[in-house]
């Protein structure tokens, strides 16, 4: 997968945030890179009316993630493609997690547990930070 240019990504996210009527906004899989995180931080300080509180990582070990992805039956869910995506995710996650833990609230959740348990963990962290 190709990551879209930052300007395009920020425009999409900015419009979505401005159109949301919710007081909590959870962005799944965003930001994908440290460069996106810096631009997102600038965006939230500039003109969205949103305060960036922190990040929640739902970490899934490679073996579990591979099994789950290959069971989805999507055309782009080939093992070789997933291997590249997972490697890129891990490389970016190290920098992002370090930055969020130093500058914001950061929680890492065990994504190898059931989906229901993962959702409860995410909800608990969101509610604890409000």
Image: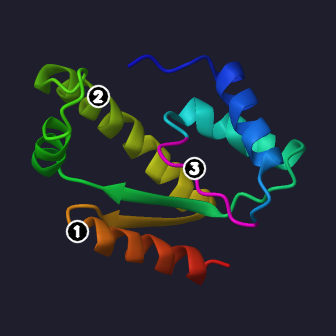
Q: Name the residue under label 2.
A: 85
- Residue 114's disc is 1
Whether tag 3 and tag 1 are in contact, CB under 8 A, the answer is: no
Observer-nearest residue: 15 or 96? 15
Left or right: 77 with respect to 12? left
Q: Is residue 29 magenta?
A: yes
Q: How crowded is mark 1: few (under 14 residues within 10 Å), some or many (20 or more)?
A: few
Q: In this view, does 129 lie to the left or right of 123?
A: right
**C-alpha span from label 2 to label 1:** 22 Å
Q: Residue at x 14, y 36 (%)?
A: 70
Give the spatial CA distance, label 3 vs label 1: 20 Å
Q: Which mark is residue 27?
A: 3
Query: Please, what secondary structure does the residue beneath circle 2 have?
Result: helix
Disc nearest the viewer among 2 and 1: 1
Question: On screen, 56 above or below 39?
Answer: below
Horizontal side of residue 6 vs 73, given as left or right: right
Q: Disc 3 versus disc 2: distance between alpha carbons?
A: 19 Å
* Image coordinates for residue 46, horizontal then vertical, percent: 88, 43
Q: Position of residue 98 (x, y in %)?
A: 47, 52
Residue occupying the point 69% across, 37% down: 13
What stretch of residues is rendered in magenta?
A: 23-30
Give the residue at x 61% y 40%: 37
């Amino acid at each position: 997968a190709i990551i879209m240019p930052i300007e395009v990504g920020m425009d999409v996210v900015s419009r979505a945030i401005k159109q949301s009527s919710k007081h909590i906004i959870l962005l799944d899989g965003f930001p994908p890179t440290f460069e996106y995180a810096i631009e997102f931080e600038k965006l939230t300080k500039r003109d969205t009316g949103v305060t960036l509180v922190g990040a929640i990582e739902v970490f899934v070990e490679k073996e579990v993630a591979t099994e789950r992805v290959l069971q989805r039956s999507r055309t782009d869910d080939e093992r070789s493609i997933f291997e590249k995506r997972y490697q890129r995710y891990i490389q970016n996650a190290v920098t992002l997690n370090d930055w969020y833990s130093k500058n914001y609230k950061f929680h890492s959740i065990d994504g190898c547990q059931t989906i229901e348990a993962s959702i409860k963990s995410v909800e608990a962290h969101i509610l604890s930070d409000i």
